[in-house]
Image (spheres, grey):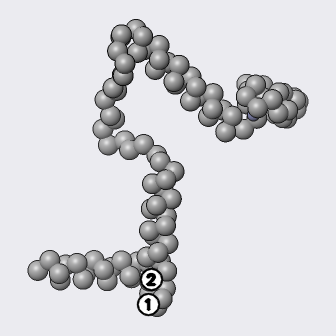
Amino acid sequence: MPVKIKTCPVCGEEFETKNIRKMYCSIKCNNKVQKARRKERLERRKKEMGVAEVNYPKQRGAKRYSPEKAQATHDRQAEIERKARAAGMSYGQYQYKKYLAGLKGAE
Ligand SMILES: [Zn+2]
């Protein structure tokens, strides 16, 4: 496919693409549009239902991805990793030791 130069409707940036269906320059701009569409849909639904809030039931088991939580998890693991290394152990060894200590403590 030939390379086409398109203009991103979100940020106005020009970008090259071989994909004729690609509309936005980046995932960031694409996300912006998706978010706006979601919001629009939600607003329309609220009007249809005549309510101030639409409470969709939470999907069972499916936790929403949160960058903050992912970062927190990463930080926690990095901290454990650091402690493990300081004690001359691997992450797994350290966690196992903690697990054993927890078993002893529970008795
Ligand atoms: Zn863009």
- Quadrant location of the N terminus in the rendered image: top right
Q: Is residue 101 above or below residue 44?
A: below
Q: Viewed as shown, does residue 55 lie left or right of 72?
A: left
Percent coordinates x, y for residue 5 in the rendering: 87, 29
Q: Nearer the viewer, residue 22 or 81?
A: 81
Q: Secondary structure at mark 2?
A: helix
Q: Which residue is mark 1?
A: 87
Q: Outermost residue toward the front? A: 52
Q: Answer with the quarter of the image where residue 6 lies.
A: top right
Q: Quadrant of ligand 1?
A: top right
Residue 92 in view in this figure: yes
Q: Is residue 14 above or below residue 70?
A: above
Q: Residues within 10 Å of mark 2 (few under 14, many from 20)?
A: some
Q: Viewed as shown, does residue 84 lie left or right of 13?
A: left
Q: Is residue 90 above or below residue 9?
A: below
Residue at point 40%, 8% (across, down): 48
Q: Residues within 10 Å of mark 1 (few under 14, many from 20)?
A: few
Residue at point 31%, 83% (across, down): 97
Q: Is residue 87 above or below residue 49?
A: below
Q: Which mark is residue 83?
A: 2
The answer to the question of whether label 2 and label 1 lie on touching residues, with beta carbons closer than 8 A, is yes
Q: CA distance from mark 2 to mark 1?
A: 6 Å
Residue at point 49%, 72% (across, down): 78
Q: Secondary structure at mark 1?
A: loop
Percent coordinates x, y for residue 91 in the rendering: 44, 78
